[in-house]
Amino acid sequence: MVENILVSVAWPYANAEIHVGNLTGAYLPADIFARYQRLRGRKVLMVSGSDSHGTPITVRADAENTTPLEVYQRFHESFLELFEKLGLTYDLFTSTHTSNHFDVSQKIFLSLLKNGFLYTAREMQWYAPSQKRFLPDRYVEGTCYICGFGNARSDQCDKCGSLLDPDKLIEPRSKIDGSTPELRETEHTYLDLAKLQPAVVEFLKQREGYWRPNVMRQSLGQILADNLHGRAITRDLDWGIPVPVDGWDGKCLYVWFEAVIGYLSASIEWSQLIGNKDAWTQWWHGSQSQSYYFIGKDNIPFHAVIWPAQLTGSGKTFDELMGFPNPSPLNLPYDVPANEFMNLEGQKISGSRGWAVWGADALTRYDPDPLRYYLTVNMPESKDTDWDWDDFFHRNNDELVATWGNLANRILSFTCKIWGNKVPEPGELTQQDKDLLAQIENGFETIAAELEAVRLRAALGEGMRLASEVNKYLDQTAPWIAVKTDKAAAARAVFTALKAIDSLKILLAPFLPFTSERLHGFFGNQQPLFGKQYIETINDELGSHKALRYDSDGASGLWEPSKLQPGQDLVNPQPLFKKLDISIVSEERARLGQK
Ligand SMILES: [Zn+2]
């Protein structure tokens, strides 16, 4: 029996704001899945954090004449605010710049070293004599020796797309001060992926059949086409995690190596925060746990190949370094349901061109649930999708408001008015009533099956189809007319519809948590469906960092059909969703492309 579900969510780079493509690619699907699993009564641990190291952040800091620490903290705080407002229920959203993450990453490194999966090699690297330091590839530009483009990066030309040999670059120059760098020899540590390949292939073959085809293609397919080769996991950089070996001063762990370790380190940090330091092992050891990694397609090799290689290579040694008496190997990913990309109005999203819908900005004009709804019906689960403002307008008004919001509001208002804020006594239900309730009840099976398989669009589509069934039922039974001639028939129809809506509230709660929670309150419930999010400041040897947390205490939601009883008190409802004016389409389109 699988009791524990680890929801591992991609770590956003703390050097740029988050747009709708990022949200629908990884962060929102993770939350929908986690909320569903919580309603099922499973023990969920949802973790992630800001990726605070690496050259994208140092480049931005250099450009702004500030420190990498300042850049990371600024974006990290904006992520916390966005995720809280959008209702993403991270048990812990932390950062890679914590002393815990340093320690865990170094222990994984040392485990791989002890088990013989690391080796060192010398290579040529750009060095800036003017600054007395090595320069990462993206710090060096020059003329492409293939097409003559003047602003080629040292490892790749953006004009002709060719991968370049750094030593052939014509007239290389440092992006920092324009000085001429030189190639110097340096030593790096490599992860021996060739040696780990048999274990990784075995791991992937066990997952054939249920992984998304695209993920299999980019992992097992790639390995079978072109074997794995060693990859450097250290860099000549001082912003990052020090290499835990004597004589390696001035070098740090390469960001792709340590960021994926964040899933493990965040689980450990969360355990420390709840005062049960070994709690993480419930999600990382044994067969009662499954781990899901929610990422975008650009991250597939790191999560489906390299991270499993790191885990396999660490074996039981990580537990030994943690001081456990009975060390076990760490669990490998159960599923990596990577999404494709979302475009915007027919074009690729581009932050630098201002062609983006930013999460934080959109939340200043729209409520979180309508955004969550549109991002789910349009989720790029099997192919790229497109955010289109006209489509957003219609989906909001014609589906969310017309099919679901009005249904709930109309029947609750009517009941409150006619039966004095109490669920009426239905008498004996007709076959038509029973058929509707059976259909809704069946939704707890069909929607669950879609959610278990991480087909979130299909799950939401089925929920909305069931809402349409309730509308059809009310068109046929028309209690607002029947009440004038046959109040008992009206009471029966109203009871049946209320019970269906009370169930739909749960079926839609993973997708629309804010409005389901409000509706839950209109049904007279005091206890909330879900727990509470909050932001906490955590101090450690590196200073302090803020984190987003989730406290499930008091949550009462269960994945089961309504048990609504006659006589239950109801609260006068408010509309769940706002109808939008068509003018938003042209207003929003006018915003695009402005920086
Ligand atoms: Zn070129």
Image: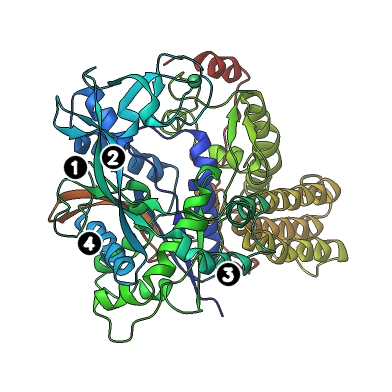
Q: Is mark 2 within 8 Å of ligand 1?
A: no
Q: Nearer the viewer, mark 4 or mark 3?
A: 3
User: Closer to us: mark 3 or mark 2?
Assistant: 3
Residue 80: x percent and y percent?
Answer: 33, 43
Among numbered discs 3 and 2, the one appearing first in the sequence: 2
> Looking at the image, is mark 3 or mark 1 earlier in the sequence?
3
Q: Mark 1: which secondary structure?
A: loop
Residue at mark 1? 238
Residue 564 image offset from top left, x and y in percent: 63, 66
Q: For the residues marked 3 and 1, what is the alpha-carbon distance in whole angstroms?
A: 37 Å
Name the one closer to the observer, 526 or 459.
459
Residue 266: x percent and y percent? 33, 60
Amino acid on which disc 4 is placed: Asp
Secondary element type, mark 3? helix
Q: Of label 4 and label 3, which has the lower sequence position? A: 4
Q: Earlier in the sequence, mark 1 or mark 2?
A: 2
Determine whether, in the image, residue 394 is placed left or right of residue 227.
right
Q: Which residue is mark 4?
A: 103
Circle 4 sits in a helix, a strand or a loop, which is it?
Answer: helix
Residue 77: mark in rendering:
2
**Quarter in which the N terminus is drawn:** bottom right
